[in-house]
Image: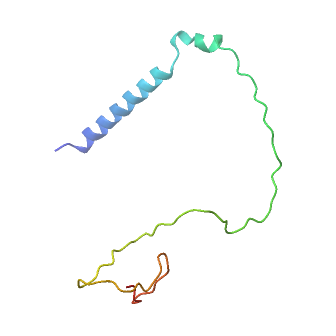
Amino acid sequence: MISRQSIKLTLTLLLATAAGVSFMACGRSNGQPNSNAASASPASAIEVSTTAAISRQLPRFFEATGSLAADVQTDVQPQTAGKIVAVGVDMGSAVKKGQMLV
């Protein structure tokens, strides 16, 4: 079984190694600036327009066109075989529990 002290030592060594690798990856050689950064031309300024912020009431709803899908769907199947002679509701109509469909 691994002791708690060996786990702490392993984690400390891993953190020290990660910190050292990060320091070396981010450091610059000989303290000199990156030559590519010095030779690059400065970026040109981009003109932007601004607008003053205003406070106003926003509507609680909005109108949009789209389609809806139900969270839960079910298949309607007859308990016995037979022929459908009448449909009690139109496609897309709201129905209530126990309402005759066919």
Against 56, is 53 above or below? above
Between 5 and 25, the one lying in front of the other is 25
Between 1 and 68, the one lying in front of the other is 68
Q: Quadrant of residue 24?
A: top left
Rendered residue at 50%/79% (across/down): 93
In the displayed structure, does residue 100 sit left or right of residue 50?
Answer: left
Q: Position of residue 56 (x, y in %)?
A: 80, 62
In the displayed structure, does residue 49 sit left or right of residue 25?
Answer: right
Q: Quadrant of residue 3?
A: top left
One can see residue 33 in this view = no
Against 40, is 45 above or below? below
Q: Quadrant of residue 77?
A: bottom left
One can see residue 89 in this view = yes
Rendered residue at 30%/36% (across/down): 9
Rendered residue at 47%/80% (across/down): 90
Q: Position of residue 95 (x, y in %)?
A: 46, 84
Q: Quadrant of the N terminus?
A: top left
Figure colour scheme: rainbow
Between 13 and 75, the one lying in front of the other is 75
Q: Position of residue 67 (x, y in %)?
A: 53, 64
Rendered residue at 39%/90% (across/down): 98
